[in-house]
Image (spheres, rainbow, N blue to C red):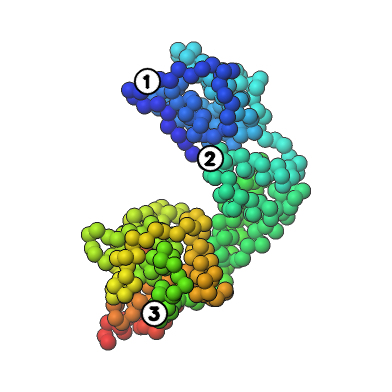
Amino acid sequence: MEATGGKRGQKRVNLPSAPQQKVVDLTVALLSEKCGGTFGRGFRLRAIGQRLYVQVSGRKIPLHLDFEAGPEAVQKRAWDLKGYLSTQVDGFDSDAWRGACAVERVKKGKTSQSRLDLDDVVARWKRLKLAEGIAESTFQRNHLPILQRLDSRRPLSEESLLSAIEGAKVGTLHRRRLIPFLRKVVKVCGGTWNADLLDPLQSAVREPQRGQPFFPDEEVIRIVMHPSLSMPWRRVVAVMAVYGLRPWEAWIAEPCNKRPGCAWIKEGKTNNRGTTKPRQVPPFHPEWVEDFALEQLWTQTLPSRAGKARSGWSVNQRLRQTGILQRGSSTAYGFRHAYARRLHSPRYRVTDTHAALFMGHTVAVHNQVYREWLGGEDPIGVYFD
């Protein structure tokens, strides 16, 4: 994570001396704001692991402090570095700077991992992630439950890590993400990661993929037009059904200005391969645009939700609370799966390339996820009907 300081032409800020500054919580963005005017153009404050660095004129300078240090120490060290740089006429002397920091330097974590209990690990990881800018609620929801699976006395031991990993279902996305997460936790806390033992568990053999549930057309119409569904939620459900959207995309979808009847998804999906482009999505079935009165539904205020990552949960909760769906039955993703099925039906005969474009993923992903379970259609034979 990094933040940028002053730019060319900006008036430099005359900050008060360090003792006069109000001590505030340590974050990369805040420290950059305080020090940007001091260092001037080209200033970068970077957090690499637990360590803080300043990048000035292409040189990465360690502050010789980590997130175990208090905000006062970090602010003071930033001012010390400013003063030190002003004395360096013949170029920066990294050895001399290291020596100048030696008295107050925070020792690198050589504490045995066996001395760290779970509370220590949680505290270190939390401080790092909050400094990187994640919200407290995100930490509580996504990070803390995983950390709490570790042994309370020896959380970084091989037995503790192995137990936490084996608790995740084989071949799932959760397990594939869990191992890199734990590997970074171990590194941040100064532990040892046994790659030979733990890494192979990430690519364990997958269990056979279950058939993907989808809503037949009659079920889609019943759900969208159900009298118990309020108009704001009807908008969400209708655009998911007509355009095959991911649940969170229903909150950012807009009517397409270039092609009436189509939807415009202004934000792509981000994953470890990058971010997909915004896209136009045609309606299938086209008559549903009029049948569901989408022109009027677009004007409805969107309902609240429990965050982007839990948009599907929000839709499922609404449909189950109103009795439209029974608990344990199909979920909101059934609308997207039904859209994929309609694309490849004999009525439309959309190619895999165009189907992947409409749905906002690659052809490889489309074939992997949908082709094996669509059923009822012969991918080649439909062209000869």
Kindly identify which residue carries mark 2: 132
Mark 1 closeness class: few <14, some 14–19, many ≥20 residues within 10 Å: few
Mark 2 closeness class: few <14, some 14–19, many ≥20 residues within 10 Å: some
Residue at (47% x, 69% y) in the render: 332
Kindly identify which residue carries mark 3: 217
Give coordinates of residue 281: x percent, y percent. 31, 64
Residue at (66% x, 20% y) in the render: 103
Classify residue 156 as left or right of residue 350: right
- Do callouts 2 and 3 mark residues in contact (Cβ within 8 Å)? no
Q: Mark on residue 312?
A: none
State the SS at label 3. Answer: helix
State the SS at label 2. Answer: helix
Disc 1 marks a residue whose amino acid type is Lys
| Mark toward the start of the polypeptide (2 vs 3) | 2
Disc 3 marks a residue whose amino acid type is Asp
Residue at (77% x, 48% y) in the render: 153
One can see residue 4 in this view: yes
- Look at the image and tell me in which quarter the C terminus lies: bottom left
- Label 2, label 3: how many angstroms apart (C-alpha)? 46 Å
- Label 3, label 1: how many angstroms apart (C-alpha)? 63 Å
- Do callouts 2 and 1 mark residues in contact (Cβ within 8 Å)? no
Give coordinates of residue 132: x percent, y percent. 53, 40
Query: Considering only vertical position in the picture, is 29 above or below 19?
Result: below
Give coordinates of residue 144: x percent, y percent. 64, 51
